[in-house]
Amino acid sequence: MPRMSKKMKQEWAFFIGANGRRQYNELCRHCRHDCKQSFRAIVLECPKYESKRAVAVYPLHTSNAVVGV
């Protein structure tokens, strides 16, 4: 793997870890999408991320029609 130039290190400073390599968030590390976030990010907001443990929330189906009139 080639070394990073000074300019590239400045651009990737938020992603560079103690070992000098790019590091991603634990949840992003296993994701197949390109929208990776830094390991320094605490709050993860990704529209493509779906937790396997998340509870499915379904909208209530209510009808505005008047019945029996």
Image (tube, rainbow, N blue to C red):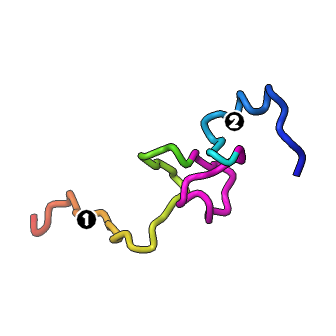
* Residue drawn at (33%, 71%) of the image: 55
Amino acid at the residue labelled 2: Trp
User: Residue 31: x and y, percent?
Assistant: 62, 62
Q: Quadrant of residue 10?
A: top right
Q: Is residue 8 above or below residue 28?
A: above
Q: CA distance from mark 1 to mark 2?
A: 44 Å
What residue is pinned by disc 1? 60
Q: Tell me which label, 1 or 2, sits earlier in the chain.
A: 2
Residue reaching furthest to the front: 19
Give the residues in magenta.
20-38
* Residue drawn at (66%, 57%) of the image: 33
69 or 3, which lies in front? 3
* Residue drawn at (71%, 44%) of the image: 20
Quadrant where the C terminus is found in the figure: bottom left
Q: Is residue 3 above or below residue 24?
A: above
Residue reaching furthest to the right: 2
Q: Quadrant of residue 61?
A: bottom left
48 or 66, which lies in front? 48
Number of numbered discs on residues: 2
Amino acid at the residue labelled 1: Leu
What secondary structure predominates along the stretch shown in magenta? loop
> What element does badge 2 sit on?
loop
Residue 23 in the figure: left or right of residue 55: right
User: Residue 19: x and y, percent?
Assistant: 68, 48
User: Residue 57: x and y, percent?
Assistant: 32, 66
What residue is pinned by disc 2? 12
